[in-house]
Image: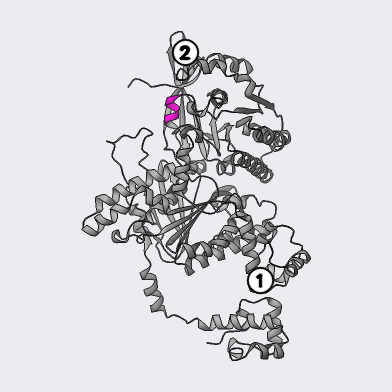
């Protein structure tokens, strides 16, 4: 990185170990510490900046074309239901954090499980040809329900040839972790998750749920520490999703809205809002919400409580929602008669 | 005008040497040769050359009168937002040559406004646009081409409806989605070191692409949130960044737009929403726009501006073509305003 030997020795004197250290310092600061002249410091900064650069600026057109070339669906993870995919413009974005919040019993875990199966399909059927890592922090993993969903795949995915449905070994590609406290969740995300992602065994991480650990481990008055831990967790998830081109789904609980100040966070369509506050909300790209409605819908001998999946915000989606119901084979959009 | 040596951009030790040798103002140095300076001030030859170069550069600068500055500023156009109320409040749009910060809670439309501006800065001159290019620093990964295509399509539709004379119709033939996308330069920055590095390399980039008129950082808060351990270093880096942004805006005649998160601040018993990154950062942008919710309405307020009245206007985010696009659906400009201005 350096132009000559004498420059190099002065850097060592100034205890600048890496290229990144150079950019931490301002120009005058560097000048004082290295005793280089103004123009030399500029040269050094430019060399350091060039070394830190990952890509040259690309035009949006190049990005758009390269996205088109990769088959369209590999940028999104299909929710395995045409109604929901239409709402989400193809499904969950890859390389970003999506949050799904809702009251208990709203069907969050159901959708999480469904995505764990959907990710295993090849790209032409909306999947990523890979497995899923399911991290449970609240409850036991609902293994019986998963078996039921696997059995129902041929019904849910009638668009997929039945030969493909039968040859995919769904339960072999879902890695389940139980983490009872924040520390073990961090260990899981920093050690085991990169291994699975790096080998290509996994391209979807589901955290069910993020709120429970934070809600039980922190008192109301150590919110500063709580925010710090939230940022550490979210930066880990950001790193994993970007570095390995994976989808991250964080299931979140909700809190009741009491005060008027919470209203300023968004138009309140219901009396609840996602938990963990603004510090967490700033970290997610897509925020979805599942609401449990009063009505029930029935189909043959099955009946289900009606739910509504709503897009709260996303850079590419409109604020909109669809009615959904949970059937034996999975979560499906419901088109209500007018 | 006499300029003190201490104000020159030189290393502190060098300045001390010069002052100790009795040199007070740049005028004392102008006529000297490097050799004389070496002898008189006891500095090395290279240092002497550097000093004299610095003096010469500053000697070339001429002061401008207020009238000249006014004329210069009038030549710079503004970037229209196509949201008529907001354009009205901002006196024609976002000014070129100044820094603007857009802050708001997640989901209120910060990224949407940035994407809209990235398209709007390319509106041809004959439509009253700037006809420039954009450099877009994406720190959060929220730049999705899918949405830019939506906005570009809506803006082209809007402009083609406005086209009246031949010149404008000719301009419309080259104002296409393809050209709009090819004029947006995107840089994905994963942390603040990458952001600082890119900003440092920007002058080289601008030499190759002199038509760049808008710089967007979406968002500036996100990379700095990682520095939660060392707040004093964060403050120092933010100060450096703000200086860099201001100098880019003025020296290259560019509009600089950054977005910022909101954070909660406790004041007594009550909590308030305030822009993130602290009070010191608040001085960095020339204009500060706050996007916020009032029940189901989206509002934009001018929080700080030396040349605009404080105002609050309503805006909407519209036109989301379906995945299976519906040709008959009416297409509005992507951000269109409704309702009246309520001045405060």
- The spot of residue B189 in percent (x, y) is 57, 51
Instruction: Give the secondary structure at mark 1.
Output: helix
Q: Assign the magenta stretch its main secondary structure.
A: helix
Classify residue B320 by image quadrant.
top left
Magenta region: A81-86
The residue pinned by badge 1 equals: A40
Of pointers 1 and 2, the one earlier in the residue sequence: 1
Q: Which mark is residue A303?
A: 2
Relative to A326, say whether A23 is above or below.
below
Q: Nearer the viewer, mark 1 or mark 2?
A: 1
The figure's colour scheme reads one colour
Instruction: Give the secondary structure at mark 2.
Output: strand
Relative to A37, A128 lies left or right: left
- The spot of residue A49 in percent (x, y) is 62, 59
Relative to A218, say whether B77 is above or below.
below
| Crowdedness near tag 2: few (<14), some (14–19) or many (≥20) residues, C-alpha within 10 Å | some
């Amino acid at each position: 990185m350096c132009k000559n030997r004498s420059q190099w020795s002065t850097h060592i004197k100034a205890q600048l170990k890496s290229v990144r250290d150079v950019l931490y310092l301002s120009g005058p600061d560097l000048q004082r510490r290295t005793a280089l002249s103004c123009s030399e410091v500029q040269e050094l900064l430019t060399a350091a900046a060039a070394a830190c650069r990952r890509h040259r600026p690309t035009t949006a057109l190049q990005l758009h074309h390269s996205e088109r070339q990769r088959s369209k669906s590999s940028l999104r993870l299909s929710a395995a239901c045409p109604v929901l995919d239409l709402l989400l413009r193809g499904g969950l974005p890859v390389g970003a954090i999506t949050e799904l919040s809702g009251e208990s019993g709203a069907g969050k875990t159901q959708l999480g499980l469904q995505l764990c199966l959907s990710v295993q399909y090849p790209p032409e059927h909306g999947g990523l040809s890979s497995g899923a890592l399911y991290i449970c922090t609240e409850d036991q993993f609902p293994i019986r329900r998963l078996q039921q969903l696997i059995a129902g795949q041929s019904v849910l995915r009638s668009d997929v040839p039945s030969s493909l449905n039968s040859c995919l070994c769904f339960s072999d590609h879902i890695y389940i972790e139980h983490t009872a406290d924040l520390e073990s969740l961090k260990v899981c995300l920093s050690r085991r998750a990169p291994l699975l992602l790096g080998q290509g065994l996994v391209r979807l991480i589901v955290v069910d749920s993020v709120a429970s650990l934070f809600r039980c481990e922190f008192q109301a008055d150590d919110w500063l520490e709580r925010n710090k831990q939230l940022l550490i967790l979210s930066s880990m998830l950001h790193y994993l999703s970007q570095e390995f081109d994976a989808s991250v789904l964080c299931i979140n609980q909700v809190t009741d809205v009491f005060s008027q100040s919470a209203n300023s966070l968004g138009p309140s369509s219901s009396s609840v809002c996602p938990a963990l506050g603004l510090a967490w909300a700033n970290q997610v790209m897509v925020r979805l919400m599942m609401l449990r409605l009063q009505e029930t819908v029935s189909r043959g001998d099955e009946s289900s409580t009606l739910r509504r999946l709503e897009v709260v915000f996303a850079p590419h989606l409109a604020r909109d929602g669809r009615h959904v119901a949970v059937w034996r084979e999975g979560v499906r959009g419901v088109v209500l008669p007018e | 005008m006499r300029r003190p040596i201490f104000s020159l951009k030189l290393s502190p030790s060098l300045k001390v040497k010069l002052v100790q040798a009795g040199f007070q103002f740049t005028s004392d140095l102008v006529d000297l040769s490097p050799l004389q300076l070496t002898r008189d001030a006891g500095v090395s030859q290279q240092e002497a050359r550097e000093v004299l170069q610095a003096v010469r550069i500053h000697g070339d600068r001429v002061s401008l009168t207020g009238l000249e500055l006014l004329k210069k500023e009038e030549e710079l156009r503004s970037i229209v937002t196509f949201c008529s109320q907001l354009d009205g409040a901002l006196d024609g749009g976002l000014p070129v040559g100044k820094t603007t910060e857009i802050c708001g809670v997640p989901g209120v439309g910060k990224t949407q406004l940035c994407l809209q501006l990235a398209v709007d800065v390319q509106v041809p001159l004959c439509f009253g646009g700037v006809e420039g290019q954009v450099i877009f620093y994406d720190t959060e990964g929220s730049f999705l081409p899918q949405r830019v295509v939506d906005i570009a399509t809506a803006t082209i539709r809007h402009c083609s409806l406005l086209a009246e004379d031949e010149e404008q119709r000719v301009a419309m033939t080259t104002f296409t989605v393809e050209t709009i996308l090819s004029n947006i330069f995107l840089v994905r920055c994963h942390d603040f070191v990458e952001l600082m590095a890119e900003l440092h390399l920007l002058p080289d980039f601008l030499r190759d692409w002199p038509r760049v008129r808008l710089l967007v950082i979406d968002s500036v808060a996100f990379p700095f949130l990682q520095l939660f351990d060392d707040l004093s270093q964060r403050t120092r880096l933010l100060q450096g960044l703000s200086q860099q942004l201001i100098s880019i805006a003025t020296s290259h005649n560019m509009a600089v737009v950054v977005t910022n998160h909101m954070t909660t601040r406790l004041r007594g018993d009550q909590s308030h929403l305030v822009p993130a990154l602290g009070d010191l950062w608040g001085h960095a942008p020339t204009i500060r726009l706050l996007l916020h919710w009032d029940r189901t309405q989206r509002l934009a307020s001018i929080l700080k501006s030396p040349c605009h009245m404080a105002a609050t206007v309503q805006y909407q985010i519209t036109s989301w073509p379906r995945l299976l696009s519906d040709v008959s659906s009416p297409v509005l400009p992507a951000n269109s305003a409704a309702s009246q201005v309520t001045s405060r």
